Image (cartoon, rainbow, N blue to C red):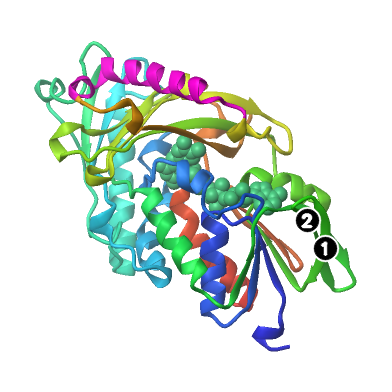
Amino acid sequence: MTKKDRRIAILGGGGLGVCAALELAQRGYRVQIFEEHQEPLKKASYANEGKIHVGFIFAMDRSFQTAGKMIDGAIHFFDYLSRWTDAKPEACVSTPFYYLVHKGSLLNAGQLDAHYQKCVDYFGQVQSKTKKRYVGLFDTLEAELLPKAEIDGIGDPEWIDDVFRTTEYSLEPRYIAEKLTLALNQNPEIEAHFSSKVTGVSQVGNGLKVEYLQDGLALSDTFDEVINTAWNGLLEIDRTMGISPIGEWSFRYKFGNKLLIPLKEADLPSCTMVLGPYGDTVNFKGKGAFLSWYPIGRTAWSSEHRPPEWDSMYAKEERMKVFHGSFEELKKRIPSLGNLDFPIGSVDPVGGAILALGNSDVDQKKSRLHDRFEVGLRSFGNYHTIDTGKYTLIPLLAMQIADRVEGIA
Ligand SMILES: Cc1cc2nc3c(=O)[nH]c(=O)nc-3n(C[C@H](O)[C@H](O)[C@H](O)COP(=O)(O)OP(=O)(O)OC[C@H]3O[C@@H](n4cnc5c(N)ncnc54)[C@H](O)[C@@H]3O)c2cc1C
């Protein structure tokens, strides 16, 4: 069978599904994508913070496997993305992150510093081996504990004990989603079915039958290879193939409020508060800001195989309430937020589902939500299921699934 004759279905047209389709098309395959929403890339890969993690946040995983995995993903992120889009890093990169050690943090500054320096060392090893530039721009990684006297300008010492200056960055995800959507629409080797919800997959002879609902009609088609990248729908579809998650899991709904106004670098520091149920601010310069405060923004939790349809469950007023509550809490800790002047119409409080192994929250030291090393690709014959784990890992996983389909890995 030639590459073009092989029938490949990708379930889910989010970040991973679209990158995998673009890579497979580039390697000479024809691909069909099934996406339940009417548009691609409008779910977690749109609503997220865009942080290209270099492992700092995963300090509770003492095995270092999660941080190592993130660094591998981060180093390759932009280089692989450039295979599929003409995205420019300068057009979407944030200001560098400060890590603010919140009072009550699960780890103190000394413990965090030890972890950060390990990340810096491992990043150096991976970078010198691959020669790839982190977020398309940088060869080095830094994390430096600032003198106490410098905390004041960044975080309020009433809440913040210590501050690290780092060179970790975010890339604005809506810009990347737009670029990927354009590449998808322009690719004649990819056939995308929107408003098409996959309801099950089953083995039929050597093939796999994909059943889906399209505009209320129950349809099906048979494929040689099926790749499940449906994130919020992942486990429910896997279940129809008799595949279980590797352990206890949970879905959370988390708001990532966007402020759609251009900012100057000095207007707002990009900050991650560690380590526990705190929050983040991201300054995307011309592309606005991302703001999240976990105790208010993490509004729902489910350990069902598929979480409720959270995206359609919150009225505009409820979303704005989450924004206002989060903003007030963040302002106490990062005072420069109080100086921001923005029309209320520029607030876009979108949320997204997060799948993770573990069923206790991040305030618990032993929570498995502090790890992400068990995520990634699992293959069962010609059926492949991918728990993306983090946005950071999308391009790397897209390359891995293409290698798997080609029989290289
Ligand atoms: C608020 C927030 C902040 C985050 N911040 C970061 C961050 O800073 N850095 C980071 O690395 N990660 C972050 N994440 C996690 C990151 O967003 C996800 O890991 C990543 O986007 C998942 O990509 P995906 O392609 O697997 O899922 P998605 O982009 O959600 O795509 C899955 C697609 O599958 C579709 N689908 C679902 N079920 C079906 C079905 N039955 N049939 C057909 N289609 C279906 C969905 O509609 C969706 O389009 C964050 C997540 C959230 C919610």
Residue occupying image coordinates x 18% and y 26%: 154
Q: Is mark 1 in CB contact (under 8 Å) with mark 2?
A: yes
Q: Residues within 10 Å of mark 1 (few under 14, many from 20)?
A: some
Q: Regarding mark 1 in the picture, which secondary structure is present there?
A: strand
Residue 312 coordinates in the image, percent (x, y): 61, 33
For residue 50, above or below residue 186: above
Amino acid at the residue labelled 2: Tyr
Which residue does the numbered mark 1 point to in the structure image? 220
Residue occupying image coordinates x 85% and y 74%: 206
Tell me the quarter of the picture where residue 264 sits. Answer: top left
Which residue does the numbered mark 2 point to in the structure image? 212
Q: Is residue 65 visible?
A: no
For residue 15, above or below residue 43: below
Residue 152 coordinates in the image, percent (x, y): 14, 20
Residue 21 coordinates in the image, percent (x, y): 57, 68
Q: Residue furthest left?
A: 149
The magenta span reads 313-339
Residue occupying image coordinates x 66% and y 84%: 4
Left or right relative to 242: residue 180: left
Q: Is the distance from the Cβ of mark 2 to the nearest ligand 1 atom less than 8 Å?
A: yes
Left or right relative to 218: residue 374: left
Nearer-the-camera pick, 193 or 211: 193
Chain-order first, disc 1 or disc 2? 2
